[in-house]
């Protein structure tokens, strides 16, 4: 279908705050929200720090017949309801068959916890070695402990169906492409709108991987920062003294709809969702391709899809994990596309403040991009103190930077080589060439 896709609603909950405005204020302060892990005792683990959501998040006990329990569903529900409220879709005259919900989330933390309890129950007293067990050994213990019901209740499917019920949508799907998940879900939503399969789509990215199981795994990979004595200084993308990423948690949501529909019902487009690009490195299990080949492909495809020239891009919301391999590869990729323009192209690293939300990272980046455009302000990257000569970027640091931002690229690059980029631009009543 012809016509542009616009963003009419946003929602977010992260370590930076509960709600888009609270998160944006913290991001603009340039102060990190990373702190000690308090959800459980991290003693004996290499990394003791994370970006935890502060306080309690107020959501309904259920959405129709679907209970809202646990951190993933709670955060995703809050972000979705905030986006729905801003978009004003409760009065939308669109049949359920023309509405859709797309959710990006891993939910591995909940599954591992449930399986771990079943494994403990399946291990005979005094038997330390579990290596001879097979998955079927767990099934009786999952049933006895109610684990099977619990796995369904805390699953992506449960969240997807709960949000579909609330959004009155008869189309719903989940996406799981690791750190690229949020962007992938939004890209899939753009495809649905362009193909004429839907008129309005709610997209949500969520993850809550601050668990012993998930953090332990990343510690074994030596991927997490161990700056435990100074958690607020731990996440430092593109800084010479970075030593790994910091786990975060939370969710972000956006409402996408056809421009004609939004304008006809009197909604206010916040920005245009212009383009999407996706690629795969197929290089190594965890490391990105070092020259940034796949990253270049995803960014160039997003720009081509959105008909953005380099001159139209006024800011980059970098993937910026604060790991040596990612930051260097992303810098090379950006330099290959933008050349000398990169010397004065503002770059910000949101993960420096809130940590890495994995499946939620791209969705957070999309909401931040919308705020960057509507406020004409690029938020600073926390802890950028000693520039890495291998990351020769115009990093915004210290204070927010006022800028004339027409377009923003949002990068999300996942373990295993999934690369997804969004091109978001300022909305203008007249279509842009």
Image (cartoon, grey):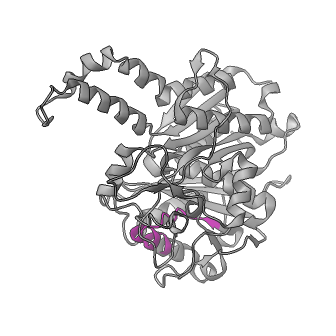
> What is the x, y in percent for residue 359?
50, 46
Q: Which residue is at 78% across, 70% downward?
A: 404
Question: For residue 390: magenta?
Answer: no
Q: Which residues are magenta?
A: 316-331
Question: Could you say which quadrant of the image residue 188 lies in?
Answer: top right
Q: Is residue 397 above or below residue 166?
A: below
Report if residue 285 is visible in the image: no
Q: Nearer the viewer, residue 132 or 420?
A: 132
Question: For residue 324: magenta?
Answer: yes
Q: Which residue is at 62% across, 66% downward?
A: 316
Q: Is residue 352 above or below residue 53?
A: below
> What is the x, y in percent for residue 185?
55, 42
Instruction: Locate the N terminus and report the quarter of the image it occupies.
Output: top right
Q: Nearer the viewer, residue 373 or 385?
A: 385
Q: Nearer the viewer, residue 102 or 142?
A: 142
> How many numbered marks have been drawn onto this rendered protein structure?
0
Q: Is residue 428 left or right of residue 172?
A: right
Instruction: Locate the C terminus and report the quarter of the image it occupies.
Output: bottom right
Q: Is residue 353 above or below residue 167?
A: below
Q: Which residue is at 18% across, 27% downward?
A: 123
């Amino acid at each position: 279908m012809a016509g542009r896709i616009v963003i009419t609603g946003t929602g977010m909950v992260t370590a930076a705050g509960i709600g888009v405005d609270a998160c944006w204020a913290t991001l603009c302060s340039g102060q990190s929200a990373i702190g000690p892990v308090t959800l459980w005792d991290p003693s004996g683990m290499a990394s003791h720090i994370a970006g935890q959501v502060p306080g309690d998040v107020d959501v309904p006990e259920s959405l129709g017949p679907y209970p809202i329990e646990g951190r993933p569903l709670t955060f995703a529900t809050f972000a979705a309801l905030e986006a729905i409220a801003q978009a004003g879709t409760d009065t939308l005259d669109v049949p359920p068959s023309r509405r859709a919900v797309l959710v990006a989330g891993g939910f591995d933390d909940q599954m591992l916890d449930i399986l771990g309890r079943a494994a403990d129950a399946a291990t005979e007293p005094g038997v330390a070695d579990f290596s001879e067990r097979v998955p079927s050994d767990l099934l009786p213990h999952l049933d006895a402990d109610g684990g099977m019901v619990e796995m369904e209740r805390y699953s992506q499917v449960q969240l997807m169906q709960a949000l579909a019920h609330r959004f009155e949508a008869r189309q719903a799907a989940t996406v799981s492409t690791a750190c690229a998940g949020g962007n992938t879900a939004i890209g899939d939503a753009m495809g649905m709108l362009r193909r004429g399969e839907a008129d309005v789509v709610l997209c949500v990215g969520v993850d809550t991987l601050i668990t012993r199981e998930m953090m332990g795994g990343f510690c074994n990979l030596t991927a997490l920062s161990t700056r435990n004595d100074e958690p607020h200084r731990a996440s430092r993308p593109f800084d010479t003294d970075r030593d790994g990423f910091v786990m975060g948690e939370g969710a972000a949501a956006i409402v996408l709809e056809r421009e004609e529909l939004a304008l006809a019902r009197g909604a206010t487009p916040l920005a245009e969702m212009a383009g999407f690009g996706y690629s795969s490195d197929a290089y190594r299990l965890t490391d990105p391709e070092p020259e940034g080949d796949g990253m270049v492909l995803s960014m160039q495809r997003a720009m081509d899809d959105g008909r953005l020239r380099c001159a139209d891009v006024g800011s980059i919301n970098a993937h910026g994990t604060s790991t040596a391999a990612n930051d260097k590869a992303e810098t090379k990729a950006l330099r290959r596309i933008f050349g000398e323009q990169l010397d004065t192209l503002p770059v910000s690293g949101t993960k420096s403040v809130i940590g890495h939300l994995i499946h939620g990272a791209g969705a957070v980046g999309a909401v931040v991009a919308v705020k960057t455009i509507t406020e004409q302000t690029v938020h600073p990257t926390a802890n950028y103190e000693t520039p890495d000569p291998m990351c020769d970027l115009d990093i915004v640091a210290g204070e927010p930077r006022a800028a004339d931002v027409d377009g923003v690229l949002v990068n999300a690059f996942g373990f295993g080589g999934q690369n997804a980029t969004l091109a978001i631009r300022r909305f203008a009543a007249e279509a842009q060439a």
